[in-house]
Image (cartoon, rainbow, N blue to C red):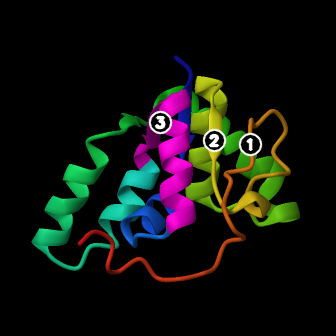
Amino acid sequence: MALTIVDSDILIDVARGEADAINCLLHLEQTSALAISAVSQMELIVGCRNKKELKDLGTFLSRFQTLKITDRISEVAVDLLTRYFLSHSLLIADGLIAATALVHNEAFVTKNQRDFRFIAGLNLPYPLLSPPAHRSHRNLIR
């Protein structure tokens, strides 16, 4: 079964109960195994406000394989940042997440297509969601 790497923006929306994100995740679960980058995991952890939210997050994330940052992922991320920081403002976290997808040669699903679409070789299928909105993810898991 294919592996699909899911970005934190979709997981945040799932936790909020947003129908588009839930339907997207359900669709992905039918067609592939799901994974997240360790960087996405860290992004979600820092959005927790208390131990209950952190515990709930751990339960939620247990359904995903977590892809660790390896030496190769670090090397690819440095190359991506060298190529794309000045021209596209690629951020460190996004570079590491994209490098994870590239090194594992797997699809990466995100609502933030504009943050990644310029990266050569990145398999970036459209996530079946509405356009992204910038919101805080403080009430992540209830």
Instruction: Report the span colored magenta.
Output: 19-38
- Rendered location of residue 46, percent (x, y): 33, 69
**Outermost residue, top direction?**
1
Would residue 63 be found to the left or right of residue 109 on screen? left
Above/below status of 112 relative to 32: below
Task: Compute the Cα span from label 3 to label 1.
Answer: 17 Å
At horizontal 33% and vertical 72% (from top left) the residue drawn is 140
Identify residue type, mark 2.
Phe
Q: Residue at 57% across / 46% down in the picture?
A: 97
Which residue is identified by label 3? Answer: 29
Mark 2, other Cα within 10 Å: few <14 / some 14–19 / many ≥20: many
For marks 1 and 2 on the same chain, the one whose residue lies earlier in the sequence: 2
Q: Earlier in the sequence, mark 3 or mark 1?
A: 3
Give amino acid for label 1: Leu
Describe residue 110's horizontal placement relative to residue 85 as left or right.
left
Query: Could you tell me what secondary structure mostly forms the magenta stretch?
Result: helix
Which quadrant of the figure contains the C terminus?
bottom left
Residue 111 rendering spot, x and y as whole percentages:
66, 61
Q: Quadrant of residue 64?
A: top left
Residue at which label 2 appears: 108
Mark 3 nearby-residue class (10 Å; few <14, some 14–19, many ≥20): some
Label 2, label 3: how far apart the Cα atoms are: 14 Å
Q: Is residue 31 shown in magenta?
A: yes
